[in-house]
Image (cartoon, rainbow, N blue to C red):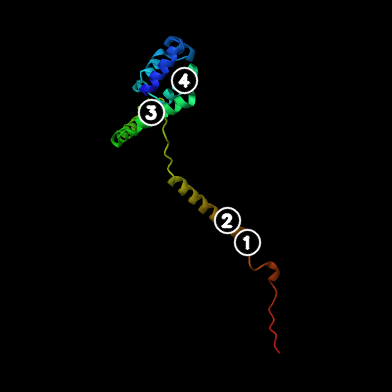
Amino acid sequence: MKELGFYLQDTRRSNGVSLEEAASDLNVDVSYLENIESANVRAFKDVYYMRKLVKEYAKYLGLSEDKIQDEFNDFLFEHTSKISLDDIMAAKNKKEEQNLENTKKIQSPYTKTYKMKVKKMPFILAFIVFLIIIVIAIIVIKNINRKPAITNELKGVELYEYTY
């Protein structure tokens, strides 16, 4: 990255552009360009923002964006390939702890939403009782509307026996 930073700095100086002028033209803070030229990678929180800024800076200076991008990608590969597994696991654990802390936020009793627990048993019992009442009502209505087995028409009819 140092070589890339020095190359960008030499190109800027050979073009006769001051650091403040380049920063104002790119709408960035002067410290960002100073950190790129001095290869201070730790000043950037986001590597992708740094990549974008290097690409814009190269385009501003009239350099080949692809060549500069390839140089930066080579640096990025070397830089990230030196990270140990322990560091990666520590960062992962730290992120998980932060996620746990974020989920355990204190809430005001005025804004906290409460979940109402619905007891199902009373509804089930009420439904069963309702069904039993309906069955009993159907049976009673059928018995009330039933006609008697012996009607008035059959009274007085005598039974004859047929003999041969």
At label 1, counting other C-alpha atoms closer than 10 Å, the crowd grade (few under 14, some 14-19, many 20 or more) is: few
Tell me: residue 164, above or below residue 42.
below
Whether residue 33 sits left or right of residue 147 in the image: it is left
Nearest to the observer: residue 29 or residue 81:
81
Kindly identify the amino acid type of the residue bearing the numbered disc 1.
Arg
Q: CA distance from mark 3 to mark 2?
A: 86 Å
Q: Secondary structure at mark 2?
A: helix
Nearest to the observer: residue 89 or residue 24:
24
Reading the chain from its start, which is encountered first: label 4 or label 2?
Answer: 4
Kindly identify the amino acid type of the residue bearing the numbered disc 2.
Ile
Nearest to the observer: residue 120 or residue 127:
120
Residue drawn at x 70%, y 85% is: 162
Q: CA distance from mark 1 to mark 3?
A: 98 Å
Kindly identify the amino acid type of the residue bearing the numbered disc 4.
Ala
Reading the chain from its start, which is encountered first: label 4 or label 3?
Answer: 4
* Residue under label 4: 58
* Residue under label 2: 138
Q: How many marks?
A: 4
* Residue under label 1: 146
Q: Residue furthest left?
A: 86
Reading the chain from its start, which is encountered first: label 4 or label 1?
Answer: 4
Q: Secondary structure at mark 4?
A: helix
Q: Nearer the viewer, mark 4 or mark 2?
A: 4
* Residue under label 3: 75
Reading the chain from its start, which is encountered first: label 1 or label 3?
Answer: 3
